[in-house]
Amino acid sequence: MKNLKPNSKIETEGLLNKLIVGIVITALISFLLTFFYLPLLKILNFALIQNNSFTFEIFWTTLTSSLNLNALAFTFIQSLLTTLICIFLGMPVSYFLAKYSFKGRKLLINLLTVPFVLPSIVVLLGFIILYGEGGIINRIWIDITGIPLIKLYGSIEGIVLAHSFYNISVIIRMMIPAWENVDQNLTEISKTLGGKNWTIFWKIIFPQIKNYLISASLLIFTYTFNSFAIVLYLGEVKYQTLEVRIFKLMKNTLNFPAGASLGIIQLFFNLVIIILYIIFEKKTRAMASGKEKPFYHEKIEFSKSNWKKILVEISLIIFTVFIIIFSISPMIAVIVASFKPNTPDGSPFWGYMSLLSKDYESLLGASPLRLLLNTLSFALLTTLITLIFSIGIVFILRNRLQRLNNYKKPFIENIISLAIILPMGTSSITLAMGLFLQLKNSAVFNNNVWILIVLAHVLICIPFATRSILSAYNRIDMDLLNIASTLGASRLRIFWKVELPMMKSGLIVAGIFSFAISLGEFGATNFLARAEYGTLSLGISKLLSSRTLQLPASMASILIIITFICFFLIQKTGEKDLKF
Amino acid sequence: MTYLKLQNIHMKYQNEYIIHNLNLSLERGELLILLGSSGCGKTTLLKIIAGLIHPEKGKIFIEDQDIIEFSPQKREIGYVPQSQVLFPHLNIKENIAFGLRARDRSRSLKKKDNNKIKENSKDGIEQKIQDVAKLAQIENLLTRFPSEISGGQKQRVALARAIVINPRLLLLDEPLSSIDASSRESLALMIKRIQKETKTTTIYVTHNQQEARLIADKVAIMYNGIIQQSGTMIDIDKYPKNFQIAHIMGQLNIWEINSQKFDQGHLIITTPLGDIAIASKKDKNITGIQIHPNKIELANEDEVIRQKKILDLDFSEQILIVLGKIISIIQFKSKVYQIIIQINLNKVEKPFNYLKMQTQDQDLIKNLLINQNIALKIDTKDIILF
Amino acid sequence: MKKNLNFIAVILFFLVINSQISVRSEIVQTEPKLTIYTYDSLLADPGYDFIGAFANHSGISKDDINLVLMSDANQIVTQAALEKNNPVADVLIGVDNVLIHSAKKDNLLQKYDSPELVNISSDLIDNLDSEKYVLPYDFGIIAFYYDMNRINLTTNPEIANITLEEIIEYDLDKKLIVQDPTLSSTGLGYLLWTIAVYGDPEIGFNGILNQDWRDWWNATKDDLRIAPSWGAAFSEWYEGEENRPIMVSYGTSPAYSACLYDDTSQVAFLSHENGTQNGWLQIEGIGLVKNAPHEELAKEFIDWFLSKDLQDNIAENNWMYPANEYAEISSTFNESAIDPDDVNILNSLISSEIIGTNLELWKEDWETLMSSGLKINGYISIFIILASIGSIAYIQKKIRK
């Protein structure tokens, strides 16, 4: 009590810090509450409350209707198939990319990641051009054999093919660190002990990559589980995911209670998968941190005789090239189609010229240029809000870390980290449905629906952004923050001057990722958008059934180019740790 | 007058006290070496002093001002942690300026103290950085980034960064641990020199007694959560309070006592060397013994035989005979040789027990062979008890 | 320098946002005086600018009319239903004799007795909606439509007198594009065609053949291509990419190529159960939205839309028979199109009460049976989930050992 002045100073500083943390927490919670949890409650309300009384009746009839059960079964089966195919196709490639070093390896890895953020409608367009019954592949095949090779519409193979295209990048990206972490010494020791190759794989290598493989598979499973655009267009009526079912119930039949019930069922499965994923991802992190990086990246020899080794290497290379072609060809097909006139005397630039014309205004709800502007400004806004939000989350978690030194775990932050998991497990259609049910009679919905579209995009992007920023944050040495505080920097100053600059690459990646996701988001946008607030993706989807693919292909080419620029920027930051 | 005083510091970690009622005091301008084995709570203590961890109980006074409730920002304590952490996104100059700028801002926000503002103005900061850079010999590194300099240089920058804010207290946590052996000594001496020149009161934590011997004014030995003994290096070397301290001080030829009893004016102690009887007027509690390497001689056959005869508890002959096998002979200093002997006791309890002997007798050395069995004699009067 | 860049980025960002906001406020300022919801192929080929014509007729500016095109008439009704409490549209064009049941159920429209109705046959009015919530503007028979260059009586002589059953027998379903009845009005018309022909034992409706319509769909579902809308179906059929030369369209569709390109290679046909030529008549109607924001102008528009002024353009732009009896129809049109008078109209078999009560059930039944191709029910899928979770746990345990 001798020296009051410094004491009071600390208290004001502590108070200021508390105030700021308080404000951030309140802002985050109220954001989540108004735009996620209340809409979620509304969904529950629609599903379970009829005429002011609680009833399971609608929920039950929805669940047991054979139409919905079929959709559920199909959702699971196609997810399972896609996951298996992705593992099969992705493992050799990831092995090759992890174990061999060559020029352009990093670029290749980034290139293979592009399909993951490619707008789904662009992928769809690419697939129709490439694999449709009149597409290049089938035309060649028909010339040779007389029958088409791939049936794209109304077949499970078309859907699984498109989903695999999307998700191979997940398995490649996530398995590369797994292969790199495989302890070469263990394999060699077991070889000297006379282990058979197969035994070595199962007993030595597989346990080391297992957790990575499971978490990657779970991730692919969720993404496929919640797939919308591809199934909506390729599945015809025969194949529907829960996501498509919900959309149809909400938009075509206007059966809101049934849609809400189905949404809850979907949310339940998603949560189970997400929680499993979080558990396994933690394990992989524990594995990675508990181990020194192997010093040398030598090739595993599958066999001692040399020609076999060369054969394996050659087949690996051929396989990788095949996957690269598979991953890139739809994009190239779209770009080529954008220059291919419908009639012999058409201009190759007709598609791009039409972007400036007003001819398609009635059909698209707005001029193509307007759609492009919408798309870009939604994406920019989404990125901005998502980043602010994610930084806020990290700010709170950071405070928790600091307090961890006091060996106390505050309650509120645990709630926050739990509160973010739920949006992670919510599909875009369910997010949009919640916002729609909550706000469908409001002025915002009627006049400024773009706000809701941006909000839905933000909710979709936040899990990606937060994880990406957190992974950068966790690499900061705690001692550095300690030093900064002993040097007299206030908590806020430390955040601005030390933590934020050090998270920069994570922030940039998070921002670009959010931008790319928002750019091509289809499900929620399609659910919410009206007339002049459409995006390019929506425009493309409306033009899919038009007689010329040149205009939609031109629009899609623009999206492809922007996505590529995004990934070029990510490549520039050098951030390796991409979070899906 | 006592400058820094720690009083009754308690700290719990996972329901176990790692610091239990710790007291420590320090004079102004002093350099205290806090010596203790790894994991004894030294780092935790430093963090408590720096204000990064709040102790369960206890008070910290600097110049009679209790700072326990102060935030780290307010304590004005320079802290250099074990890992070499510099802000990777700032160059060396900006790293050093970090504290000055932070202080500048908080000060000018708080009150209009004209002198201080001037002192921390742009030119003032620049001047201070140049001064401290000269002191730490890093003038030519200022524009580089942390990733571009060596470990030793990093540590010097970290030191400069801590010292430039003119701290009331400087805390160094194992500053040499991640530096390669060749540059350790020079860095240790530099720390000493800077400390003397700036007259900064400093606590220097290490587990390495050799490092301590290089620079210590005063040493405090810590284990079991408290300071066990403090004083000058020489004092502690001479009179270690117990075996543990002698062990931490890295002394040669020390053994722990297994059991002891008092009998007929003799203390009979059981040690890894065998039972030893030492003349003593009264019973006293002993934790360990030490035999100075100079005080060991080769025994001749007579003495060995005699020793065998009088095994039946006749303690008049105050000589200890130890049998062993030579493991190595090295020239220790220009004329001093060190012989390492493996003691072979008849009972094989701890099979490997070594004794170091130093001698200047060149003739003796010439006659000795590796793996040769020898007998050593030690005058029990020369055995140091503690 | 860095700070400057950041600054510029922020400025650019606000510029973009600002431009967006200004574009939007402009739209808000030019609030339309009339909003029309219709489907994208209305009067579209070769194209008659009915908005411009109406603007001329009424004297309001063309920019004051907000025309919203949906991919199918079905969407018009659902969109209007979504906005029921806060209507945006004034006029719905394209609500046909089946969709009217949904529209009525949702209470979307208000009755309007247009003075132009005197020129429209009362049969047509009554068949569409005797209560006059929607008023007929055109009609045509739903029919199979094919391209003789790709399929014809020489390659497939069975077409001449085919029945729905024979479509399965001769594998024509593999060459057929139909529309999804849950999304498309033509698709719905075709669904009712099959129901009227085969009957529905579940509700005791006999139809012509006293069988079950579900059997036909079950037999064909793996071979059919189901397009989401008539437009999508037509572009696929036209492009020929899907290699399907037959689609469900209108009996008037052949008139399109005959009138425009003097090409008579495109033909429509119907099914011939019990020796008669059977078809489903689609009557398309225009309706006034309940609580329409601009009711007066909307009424004016409807009157004009049913007047000879516009109806003269129906035949050769919308390729249907105009409702107005005095509207002009070219002889080429009459020659190439199937005249509803020559057809056994199946609509008379199913009363509008039956349609009203069963429509939703039929749609759901249809969707269910189309989607049950997996032959795996939901219980098995739940079993698969549990099994996969279990196997993960098992592998986990085994490896730990």
Image (cartoon, rainbow, N blue to C red):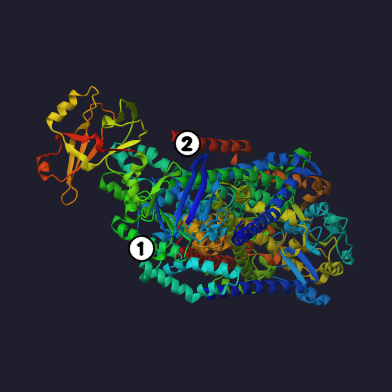
Report whether A60 appears left or right of B324: right
Q: Position of residue A500 (x, y in %)?
A: 53, 62
Q: Position of residue C71 (x, y in %)?
A: 69, 61
Quarter placement of the N terminus of chain A: bottom right
Q: Is residue A527 above or below residue A85?
A: below
SS for tag 2? helix
Residue at 44%, 41% (x, y): give it: B224
- The residue where tag 1 is placed is B193
Marks 2/1: CA–CA distance? 62 Å
Residue at 35%, 43% (x, y): give it: B240
**In the rendered image, which quarter is residue B361 located in?**
top left
Asked whether residue B137 is in view, the answer is: yes
Comparing C102 with A379, the one in front is A379
Comparing A34 with B289, the one in front is B289
Asked whether residue A130 is in view, the answer is: no
Q: Position of residue C306 (x, y in %)?
A: 83, 67
Of the residues shown, which amino acid type is indicated by label 1? Arg
Q: Tag 1, which chain? A: B
| Direction front: furthest residue | B281
Comparing B3 with A81, the one in front is B3
- The residue where tag 2 is placed is C395
Q: Which mark is drawn over residue A488?
A: none
Q: Are marks 2 and 1 on the same chain?
A: no
**In the rendered image, which quarter is residue C259 located in?**
bottom right
Q: How many marks?
A: 2
Residue at 60%, 37% (x, y): give it: C382
Comparing B138 with C400, the one in front is B138
Q: Tag 2, which chain? A: C
Of the residues shown, which amino acid type is indicated by label 2? Ile
